[in-house]
Amino acid sequence: MRRKIEKANPSQKILVTAFECLSTRGYANVSMRDIANEADVALSQLTYYYNSKEKLFIEVISVMINQYLSEIEGRLKAASNTRDKIASLIKFFKELTIDRPNLLRLFIDFTAQALWLPSFREQVDSLFNSITEMIEKNILLDNMKVDTWAHEYSSKAIARLILGAFYGTSIQIMLGFDDDKKSAFESLNLMESFIN
C-alpha cells in the first residue's frame, strides 16, 4: 500500500496518509504536522490542498462513508432473501470488528467528534441516514414479517433501531465490555431472530 501512496498525486497521498494516521491513532492524537511528516510532504503543501485540519478530516470522512456504503450496499444486493440480507449485515459488522478494527475505531471517533463539530455532524448523520435507508429498503420493506408490537412504529424507526443495535454492540465488543467475544457476537446474531 505504501508504494501506491508514493506514486499517488500529492493530494491523494495526503488523504491516504491522513486516513491511516486517524484510523490508528485517533483524531485527538493526530496533527496536520504529523500527517505532513508521514506523507513526506511539506506542511505548506498539505495546507495548500487542505487548508485546515477540519477540511482534511471531512474529506477523510467522505472516503470512509463511501467505503462503508458501497460495502453494505454490495452485500445487501448480493443476498437473495431477507434472512440472507440480515446475515450479510451481521457478517459485515463482525468482520469490521474482527478484521478491520481501525476502520470501526475511525467511525466511532468521527461519531464522537460529530457531537462537537457541526461539519462532522452533517457527514456522520448522512452516513447513518444512508445506512438506515438501506436497511429499511433492503430488509424491512422486502418481506418482513412484523410482530404486532412493530406495527406501531415506522419502518424507518425500526431500521434505526437495527443500526443502533449493530453499531452499539460493535462498540461494546471493541471496548471489551464482554471478555467472552463469542457471547458478545451472539448479541449481533440475536438481531436475526427479531426480524424473522
Image (cartoon, grey):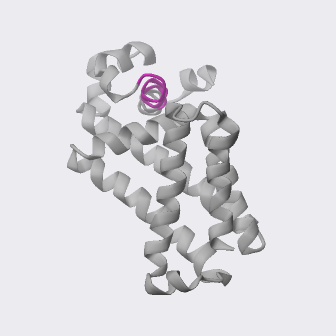
Residue 151 shown left or right of residue 119 in the figure = right
Above or below, 151 against 70 in this view is below
Instruction: Identify which residue, 100 or 172, lies in the foreground.
Output: 172
Where's the C terminus, which quadrant?
bottom right
Q: Main secondary structure of the magenta part?
A: helix
Above or below, 113 against 3 in this view is below
Q: Position of residue 112 (x, y in %)?
A: 32, 41
Instruction: Identify which residue, 113 or 15, lies in the foreground.
Output: 113
Where's the N terminus, which quadrant?
top right
The answer to which image quadrant residue 127 occupies is: bottom left
Find out whether residue 61 is within the magenta segment: no
Q: How many marks?
A: 0
Instruction: Identify which residue, 29 or 169, lies in the foreground.
Output: 169
Residue at horizontal 30 percent and vertical 25 percent from the top: 28
Q: Position of residue 77 (x, y in %)?
A: 69, 68
Above or below, 51 against 38 in this view is below
Residue 119 showing in the rendered view: yes
Residue at horizontal 50 percent and vertical 50 percent from the top: 167
- Region rendered in magenta: 16-25
Residue 58 showing in the rendered view: no
Q: Position of residue 188 (x, y in %)?
A: 63, 53
The answer to which image quadrant residue 15 occupies is: top left
Q: Position of residue 193 (x, y in %)?
A: 68, 67
Residue at horizontal 70 percent and vertical 39 percent from the top: 182
